[in-house]
Amino acid sequence: MADHAQGTDTPISDPNASTSGTAATSVNVPDRPALEGLEDKLSERWRTEGTYAFEADTTREQVYSIDTPPPTASGSLHVGHMFSYTQTDVLARFQRMNGKNVFYPMGWDDNGLPTERRVQNYYGVRCDPTKPYVEGYRPPETPAKNQRDWDVVSRKNFIELCEELAVEDEKVFEALFTRLGLSVDWSLTYRTIDNVSRAVSQRAFLRNLASDDAYLAEAPTLWDVTFRTAVAQAELEDREMPGAYHRIPFFTESGEQVIIETTRPELLPACAALVAHPDDERYQGLFGTMVTSPLFEVPVEVKAHALAKPDKGSGIAMVCTFGDLTDVTWWRELQLPTRTLIGRDGRFHAETPEWITSEAGRAHYEALAGKTVFSAKEVVVAALKEADLLDGEPKKITHPVNFYEKGDKPLEVISSRQWYIRNGGRDAARRDALVSRGREVAWHPEFMRSRYENWVEGLNGDWLVSRQRFFGVPIPVWYPLDQDGEPDYEHPILPSDEALPVDPVAEAAPGYEESQRDVPSGFTGDPDVLDTWATSSLTPQIVGQWSHDEDYFGTVFPFDLRPQGHDIIRTWLFSTMVRAEALNESIPWKHTALSGWILDPDRKKMSKSKGNVVVPTDVLDEFGSDAVRYWAASAKLGADTAYEVAQMKIGRRLAIKLLNASKFALNLGATEQNVIRSAEQAAVITNPLDRALMVRLRETVEQSTRAFEAYDYARVLNLTESFFWQFTDDYVELIKDRAYGGHGEGEQASVLAALATTLDALLRLLAPFQPFATDEVWSWWRAGSVHRAAWPGLAQEVTGIQAASDGGDAGVLSTVAQALGGIRKSKSEAKVKQRTEVRSAVVTAPADRLEQLRGALQDLKAAGNVTDLSLVEGTPEGDAVLVVSDVELAPAEDQS
């Protein structure tokens, strides 16, 4: 197909502007329209012409801003990426056509553990922050197979490798999203580890610190022993694990036994108290008294607390510091001693703790020193058996155990110094404020708001944001060292705003020299990095240029839309609300659209571990982008959706039909000059069948516009597709003779206006869903891009469609189509060709249906090749609205 000159596009800030731009000079329809090749051709055209470019010289009222989810680029491509990002893109395209200046960026979430693990395995390196930086370091071409033989590099060298590989991974994602037709402005990209993001993240943290929204504390911390890092409550995952209840006696001063049941007998030396419910009569006499632990012979007090469950086990619990989060609550509220024994490596401390004083107790602990939790459990259980201190055999159970969502071993609770951001977990007023903020946001679907509120109201601690990793945003803090070389954590050294971003491990503290690092009276840098969510929670601020260009920020913030998965409401959505409340005293966006999961045909969530993941490129190669987008947009927001090849086949059929039907309509003589845009122009549409089509078009446009405004794009697709098939299968089949001029110029003008107006509107209605096929057809007879044309529901154009539909009866189209169907059915049953002449036939129907038929009788007879058609008033049997009977076909010899 020859290239077309592109005219001036419709200004996106003017919703009432002409939908067409400069008139195309001619209609140029290819002989063989095809979907193949459109994705590459049009993607390049859109990028070259800036079809989706955001205009920065704007006002907030003109802008529709999207806080696009930055995918983890170090992860593998997944069919779910096509699913959720298509749903966002459909909404973005509607808003652009609806006159908005759409701010649609793309980010890459490339800091954190996933990137670290990928870099380690890809290059064969591991990080040691104490190593010096090596200028120009390159990893070995062939990584060592054994991890012990990997290169050990500085944190700065490791970060450089992370950034290098992340950029390559991001190119793969960008290619996928481009092929999928995302209308992203690719000049608005960012990375969560680039200099801008690091500076914004550190600046936000420092402002949180200045306002007492961030603080450093020594406290019980969920800890992953594999990755050697703290874990936040939002990153927890319960997994069913096998275990066993062990019935173990503690001893009163009089020698009586108090039986407890525990799944963690190895924590006996860390026991700080026994706890029972205050109303439990079995133990009320023991409250305030001391009992002694078996083996380790440590006295502990029996206490009362409402969280104890009388119906669980023996009704009295052993409180250890710390076995789980309930132990943390009891420890805090009952002011128990801290008896931490498990270190960051997941092993028991080598030194016997001071609270174990008896010779026998110390001997038992020495058998545990340095052992893993698993080995320690075996030792303790064996010792209990040997001392006849187990009441019966352990009872095997399956119970939920806390894991880090990316971890392989159960979490431990250890005491450590960490940074926290206040999130309402320990502050009822702050918690209530965040719930109220959630109610200012429009949720799509609405019921998802309860997930947010349930999470906020169930928080039991502040947000732990420090991580013991390497590739992340460094915590921008140093600590002065006293004369003994001990850090003064109460008086941290902070960088100037102009110095951001900083890396305290690689840069000297302000006012110090590097030679003073880690020496008495010198300084030390905080070795930790911020949790990846602590940076991702600032995506509106990062891409909106907060703290850098406040005027620019004001044109996009608060954003109009946050699209994301429903599974990360508790992490990304909530954390973004926390930061916007603290930094901007605002909601971060006005709407949030929650996508569901992709399920395999057996309705199971797709995951690499299950081996049921579909590779996106394979799907796109087989069906094409418009087909895949059709499947994604068929699913409502929030709905978990099965991967369905059948839906993609339907979407491909729709795109192909759009090409072929458009070719047919344009070849019939429809042109841009035929498109009705005003009441005066509408007078040309006179035929009842054409006016019936205009009624259906008006209804489709009105209902689709309302649905899109309600973020119900799936309904828009359903409405538009239904109308499209009625247009192609019914209307186009009925009007061919009239379009060719068989009934005079007036009738031809009427039908061509209806054809052109409907095709023009259909292309724009389908454009958000099938951008490639629609823009290809648009180029055959129009200038510019359909994606910069106005949505057909805008006021100026509706006036023309409404005028063209005045006095029209939508039932004319469906009634005439049913009559034609009856005639064709008779020919099929007679096993003759559809072009066979019908000498005579009778249509029996109620009076109102007959009146509809009379208005389009010429079209019906021409389409069915009927010579004589009698209309008889009557009521057909059953549910039929009309019956075609007494069909007399011309003899076969009369057919040529």
Image (tube, rainbow, N blue to C red):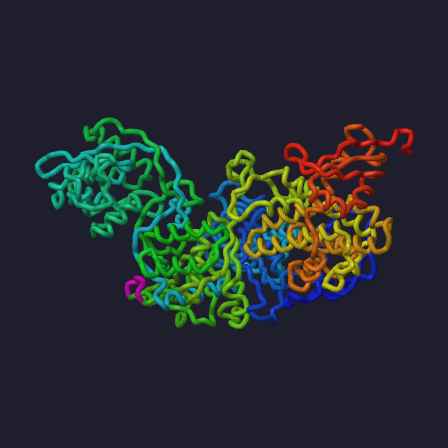
Can residue 660 be seen in this snapshot?
Answer: no
Which sits in the foreground, 74 or 814? 814
Q: Please give the name of the residue rendered at 27% of the width and 29% of the height, measured from the top-left corner.
A: 394
Location of residue 250 by image quarter? top left
Identify the residue at the far top of this view: 393
Location of residue 240 by image quarter? top left
Q: Please give the name of the residue rendered at 11% of the width and 34% of the height, measured from the top-left corner.
A: 256
Tell me if residue 512 comes above or below residue 745 in the rendering: below
Tell me if residue 157 comes above or below residue 373 in the rendering: below
Which sits in the foreground, 280 or 378? 280
Q: Please give the name of the residue rendered at 40% of the width and 44% of the height, measured from the top-left corner.
A: 237
484 is within the stretch colored magenta: yes
61 to the left or right of 521: right
Which sits in the foreground, 309 or 374? 309
Q: Position of residue 674 (x, y in %)?
A: 79, 58
Q: Which residues are magenta?
A: 483-490
Which sits in the foreground, 210 or 414? 210
Can residue 867 be seen in this snapshot?
Answer: yes
194 is within the stretch colored magenta: no
Q: Position of residue 104 (x, y in %)?
A: 59, 60
Q: Main secondary structure of the magenta part?
A: loop
Location of residue 575 by image quarter? bottom left
